[in-house]
Image: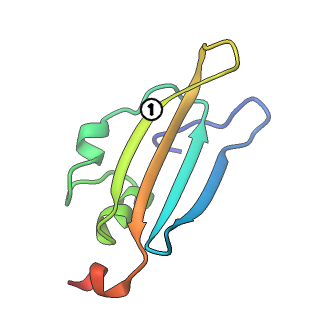
C-alpha cells in the first residue's frame, strides 16, 4: 500500500456506510500513523494512487485523522472518503 500499512494481524479495516441515501462514506483504518503527501493527494487532478483517483473522479471529499487505541496512543490512522450516490451529481 502506498499510503497505509496493515495492522500486526495483517488486516486493514474497511467500513462502508450510506448517509441519508445521498452519499457513500468509505472509511479505512490502517497502522501507518501518518498520511504522506496528503495535501497533494487531496488536490483535485493530482491524487496519488488509484483509490484516491476514484475519490476525485466521483467528486468525493477526503479527510483523515490519527487513530488512537483505548489508552489514547496513536495506533494508525483513519481515512474517510465521502462520495455522492446520485449519478447526476457525478456527471454534472
Q: Is residue 50 left or right of residue 37?
A: right
Q: Residue at x 38, y 82 (%)?
A: 86
Of residues 49 and 82, which is closer to you in this image? 82
Image quadrant where residue 58 sits = bottom left
For the N terminus, give its image quadrant. top right
Q: Is residue 7 left or right of residue 81?
A: right
Figure label count:
1
Looking at the rendered structure, the secondary structure element under dot 1 is strand
Image quadrant where residue 92 sits = bottom left
Of residues 32 and 66, which is closer to you in this image? 66
Q: Position of residue 41 (x, y in %)?
A: 30, 47
Q: Residue at x 29, y 67 (%)?
A: 59
Dot 1 alpha-carbon crowd within 10 angstroms: few under 14, some 14 to 19, many 20 or more? some
Q: Residue at x 31, y 38 (%)?
A: 38
Above or below, 5 relative to 91:
above
Q: Is residue 66 left or right of residue 48?
A: right
Q: From the image, tell me which residue sits under label 1.
A: 65
Above or below, 7 relative to 46:
above
Q: Position of residue 20 (x, y in %)?
A: 49, 69
Q: Position of residue 52 (x, y in %)?
A: 38, 56
Q: Is residue 60 left or right of residue 75?
A: left
Q: Residue furthest right?
A: 9
Q: Position of residue 22 (x, y in %)?
A: 43, 73
Above or below, 87 relative to 38:
below
Image quadrant where residue 11 sits = top right
- Judging from the image, the colouring scheme is rainbow
Amino acid at each position: 500500500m502506498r499510503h497505509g500499512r496493515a495492522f500486526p494481524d495483517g488486516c486493514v479495516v474497511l467500513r462502508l456506510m450510506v448517509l441519508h441515501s445521498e452519499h457513500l462514506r468509505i472509511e479505512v483504518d490502517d497502522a501507518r500513523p501518518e498520511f504522506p503527501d496528503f495535501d497533494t493527494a487531496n488536490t483535485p487532478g493530482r491524487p496519488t494512487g488509484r483509490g484516491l483517483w476514484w475519490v476525485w473522479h466521483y467528486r468525493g471529499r477526503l479527510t483523515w485523522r490519527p487513530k488512537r487505541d483505548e489508552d489514547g496512543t496513536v495506533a494508525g490512522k483513519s481515512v474517510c472518503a465521502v462520495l455522492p450516490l446520485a449519478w447526476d451529481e457525478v456527471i454534472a
